[in-house]
Image (cartoon, grey):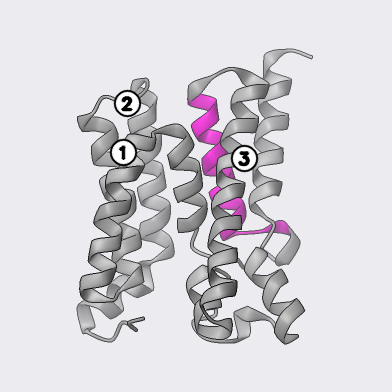
Amino acid sequence: MNHWSFFLIAMLCSYLLGSISFSYILVKQLKKVDIRDHGSGNAGATNTLRVLGKGPATIVLLLDALKGALAVILTLWMTDNPTWSILGGILAIIGHNWPIFFGFRGGKGIATTIGASFVIAWQAALVASVVAILVILLFRYVSLGSLLYTITLSLMIFILHIGPPSYFWMSLLIVLLALFQHRQNMIQLFQGKERKI
């Protein structure tokens, strides 16, 4: 197979990996309900926290992050191309947000973004994590912390000159995905109606 074949296989595997909805599976197993019919209707770690509590939410967070990390590692192993590896991470995020296995109704992709970004640019991800955690602790808005994570990640990749230039441009795509998925949260934040944890 040529390098384009490996690229396409890696992208497909990354998307399918991202499409595994651990929050849906865990809540279905433990509570026999569809998590998307409860809480915020979002299939992710934050809504798992609302529906099942801290323990299951932590498991979902770690597993969702792991699939993002694995997508990057798998793509890099298959293609040996740094730009394609970050694209693999983005495909995993897209899979999480719009999973083929669950009717294209998924989460918002932040945990998967965290996992992918720590493999791609751990220095930037570490700074972004500190910013996000501080914001969440101070204001108790997970959505705000999530958005600031992606924005800080992109800024730090640019400031620290991490990876090839494509890393920064790809990171902007991650920001756009986060903004799109949190569009309703942003409206609620401006209106003062966003739910706190």
Label 3: which secondary element = helix
The answer to which of marks 1 and 3 sits earlier in the sequence is 3
Quadrant where the N terminus sits is top right
Label 2: which secondary element = loop
Locate residue 112, reporting x and y percent: 52, 52
Q: Is residue 42 shown to the viewer in this render?
A: no
Q: Nearer the viewer, residue 42 or 31?
A: 31
Magenta stretch contains residue 95 = yes
Magenta stretch contains residue 34 = no
Disc 1 versus disc 2: distance between alpha carbons?
Answer: 8 Å
Locate residue 194, reporting x and y percent: 31, 82
Q: With 54 as the anchor, is 29 left or right in this view?
A: right
Q: Which residues are magenta?
A: 83-100
Q: Relative to 123, say whether 62 is above or below.
A: below
Name the amino acid type tagged 2: Ile
Check residue 162 in the rendering and tell me which mark sits there, or answer none: 2
Mark 3, residue position: 70
The answer to which of marks 2 and 3 sits earlier in the sequence is 3
Q: With 194 as the anchor, is 8 left or right in this view?
A: right
Tag 2 near tag 3, CB within 8 Å: no
Name the amino acid type tagged 1: Ala
Q: Nearer the viewer, residue 53 or 64?
A: 53
Disc 2 versus disc 3: distance between alpha carbons?
Answer: 20 Å
Residue at 56 percent of width and 74 percent of height: 55
Residue at 30 percent of width and 40 percent of height: 154
Q: With 184 as the anchor, is 26 left or right in this view?
A: right
Q: Relative to 173, say whether 94 is above or below.
A: below
Tag 1 near tag 2, CB within 8 Å: yes
Q: With 123 as the anchor, is 80 left or right in this view?
A: right
Mark 1, residue position: 124
